């Protein structure tokens, strides 16, 4: 009797566990990563230097997931300074606690580890992650994010024969700490020492420009095949023109939006931007081909270094690449880059993360509720220190993150008084926020009064780029807006002496960073946060994480965390199911042995 009872109990547990497995398989999957962040030695430009690696890799591993998957990344900080990762373009729906910037998270102290957990909700496309503190991105620490479509939603182009990620970036031999010291001493960063492809220096296309012994990137391909190239500018401050000798670039996606498919011979990619191209290997392979990333909008006399050069190698190539590099755009044609940017259009008939067409959201018909004209100027002295500003305010990060201060109603940390126009008053340092209206529709005009291109990024959202032009924006400029198929993205360029207008639906509650992607301007204060509060109690909005790190005036709330030493041992779903099945089989074998 006792034996039969045990058998029945085991079979009940077996059935219950199978139900759990079915529920787990039916839900949105989890993927787990354990990443150690540390200094490693590399020689991108032929000189040994310290770079930031993830799992010993520079660039770091690619995070390859599918729409709506849950991502758990346990980050151990083995650097000698605090660290945070931010997920450029991942919207963190209703969960700015995972955004990984100074306004939402306390830094991970040296020797500690902290676990991010977020869902790539209703997104597809090409993005990247990077360290958000103290110019650390200038030393590496970045990697790719690929968010694939669910199988039930068709992609608006045939499946490529391969998927290749390319990181292009200007690069300094100086460490990020030395670059920080330069900025804090009142100096600018000067011209970079070169341009990298995937952390590697240029192919020696010219001995006068490129020294011996530099490792370079080789992309191996098969003739006749079509590849998807995901290209990210992860650099410090330089816009780069990307091109492949004798090959067309078919633009298909940018930062989570499928685009109207157009051919380009080259593309200006500004700091923080991401593009996907289809490239068909349709040449005769008489030799290898150059892949080039060359600086744009720079002082030609000041830039004396080689551009970034990688190699496209067909399997039947008959020899190495040689001869001159493919020509860049005419540097004196000031409208070339702007007209190219205007030509990028949203594919309104394609589905993306959801089956309904992208164009079903008719942004041009929505009434604007808030307008901000945000002006930047060249760096200036404020209280004796060189700073950058937006609308005359240079942002200073408080010791207590804004999101934590808001959660615990800590007074005096920030003010919701960021001006919606430039104020005719002396520039100042302050922690002033934009008070966003939940479910409002905001128009932001970036007016660039600086002499260099600035890229602006908004966390938490994709916005519509509806207009840009040289000169000063006026109310009449709205007549030029694209209100039908302006591309939705998260980072847009603003040319010197020009403006760019965006529209954004504030449907994502949280604390969201609006910043320049140019690291020098960002470090010196060119950022602001947008506070978007849902006035109603929203049970679906993420609560304060149990593993939150506390700092600033809330430091006394910090518990001693075992996370400083050991990674969480959370297995992936596949591994978990494997363990459960093994346990079930073992139990059944034990029963059969008893019987």
Image: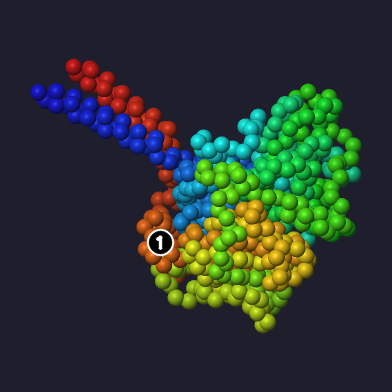
Q: Is 255 above or below relative to 391?
A: above
Decide if residue 537 is on the left or right side of residue 69.
left
Percent across and percent down for residue 483 are 64, 58
- Relative to the observer, which residue lies in front, 561 or 420? 420
Q: Is 333 above or below relative to 281?
A: below
| Extreme residue in the left direction | 1
Tag 1 residue: 558
- Judging from the image, the colouring scheme is rainbow
Q: Residue at x 72, y 36 (%)?
A: 279
- Relative to the observer, which residue lies in front, 569 or 161? 161
Q: Residue at x 77, y 38 (%)?
A: 248
Which corner quadrant of the image does residue 214 belong to?
Answer: top right
Percent across and percent down for residue 346 are 65, 49
Percent across and percent down for residue 265 are 80, 43
- In which quadrant of the rendered image does the C terminus lie? top left
Which corner quadrant of the image does residue 417 belong to?
Answer: bottom right
Q: Is 268 above or below relative to 376?
A: above
- Relative to the observer, which residue lies in front, 545 or 372? 372
Q: Element at badge 1?
A: loop
Percent across and percent down for residue 17 are 29, 32
Decide if residue 71 is on the left or right side of residue 167.
left
- Badge 1, how many Cα within 10 Å: few under 14, some, many 20+? few
- In which quadrant of the rendered image does the N terminus lie? top left
């Amino acid at each position: 009797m006792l034996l039969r009872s045990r058998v029945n109990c085991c079979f009940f547990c077996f059935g219950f566990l199978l139900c759990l497995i079915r529920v787990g398989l039916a839900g949105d999957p989890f993927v787990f990563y354990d990443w150690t962040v540390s200094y490693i030695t590399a020689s991108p430009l032929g000189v040994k230097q310290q770079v930031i690696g993830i799992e010993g890799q520079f660039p770091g591993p690619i995070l390859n997931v599918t729409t709506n998957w849950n991502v758990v990344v346990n980050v151990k900080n083995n650097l000698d300074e605090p660290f945070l990762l931010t997920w450029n373009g991942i919207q963190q729906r209703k969960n700015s606690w995972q955004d990984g910037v100074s306004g939402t998270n306390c830094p991970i102290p040296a020797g500690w580890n902290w676990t991010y957990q977020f869902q790539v909700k209703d997104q597809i496309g090409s993005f990247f992650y990077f360290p958000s503190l103290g110019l650390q991105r200038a030393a590496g620490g970045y990697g790719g994010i690929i968010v694939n479509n669910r199988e039930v939603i068709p992609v608006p182009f045939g499946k490529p024969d391969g998927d290749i990620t390319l990181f292009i970036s200007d690069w300094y031999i100086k460490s990020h700490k030395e670059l920080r010291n330069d900025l804090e001493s009142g100096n600018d960063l000067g011209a970079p020492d070169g341009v990298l492809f995937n952390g590697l220096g240029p192919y020696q296309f010219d001995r006068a420009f490129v020294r011996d012994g530099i490792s370079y990137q080789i992309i191996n391909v098969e003739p006749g095949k079509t590849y998807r190239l995901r290209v990210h500018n992860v650099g410090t401050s330089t816009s780069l023109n990307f091109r492949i000798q004798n090959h067309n670039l078919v633009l298909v996606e940018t930062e989570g939006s499928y685009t109207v498919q157009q051919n380009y011979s080259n593309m200006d990619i500004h700091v923080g931007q991401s593009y996907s191209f289809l490239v068909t290997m349709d040449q005769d392979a008489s030799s290898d081909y150059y892949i080039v990333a060359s600086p744009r909008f720079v002082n030609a006399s000041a830039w004396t270094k080689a551009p970034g050069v990688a190699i496209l190698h067909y399997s039947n190539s008959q020899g190495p690449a040689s001869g001159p590099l493919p020509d860049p755009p005419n540097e004196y044609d000031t409208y070339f880059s702007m007209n190219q940017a205007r030509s990028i259009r949203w594919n309104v008939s394609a589905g993306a993360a959801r089956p309904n067409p992208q164009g079903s959201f008719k942004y041009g018909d929505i009434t604007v509720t808030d307008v901000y004209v945000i002006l930047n100027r060249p760096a200036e002295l404020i209280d004796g220190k060189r700073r950058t500003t937006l609308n005359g305010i240079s942002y200073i990060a408080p010791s207590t993150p804004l999101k934590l201060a808001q959660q615990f109603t800590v007074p005096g940390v920030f003010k919701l008084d960021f001006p919606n126009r430039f104020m005719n008053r002396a520039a100042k340092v302050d922690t002033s926020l934009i008070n966003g209206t939940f479910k409002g529709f905001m128009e932001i005009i970036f007016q660039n009064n600086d002499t260099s291109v600035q890229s602006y990024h908004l966390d938490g959202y994709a916005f519509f780029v509806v207009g840009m032009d040289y000169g000063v924006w006026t109310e009449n400029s709205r007549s030029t807006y694209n209100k039908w198929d302006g591309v939705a993205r998260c980072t847009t360029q603003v040319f010197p002496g020009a403006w760019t207008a965006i529209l954004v639906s504030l449907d994502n509650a949280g604390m969201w960073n609006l910043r320049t992607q140019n690291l020098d301007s960002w470090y010196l204060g060119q950022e602001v946060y947008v506070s978007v509060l849902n006035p109603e109690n929203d049970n679906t909005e993420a609560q304060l994480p149990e593993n939150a790190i506390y700092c600033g005036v809330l430091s006394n709330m910090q518990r001693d965390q075992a996370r400083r030493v050991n990674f969480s041992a959370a297995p992936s779903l596949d591994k978990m199911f494997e363990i459960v099945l093994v346990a079930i089989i073992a139990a059944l074998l034990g029963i059969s042995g008893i019987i």
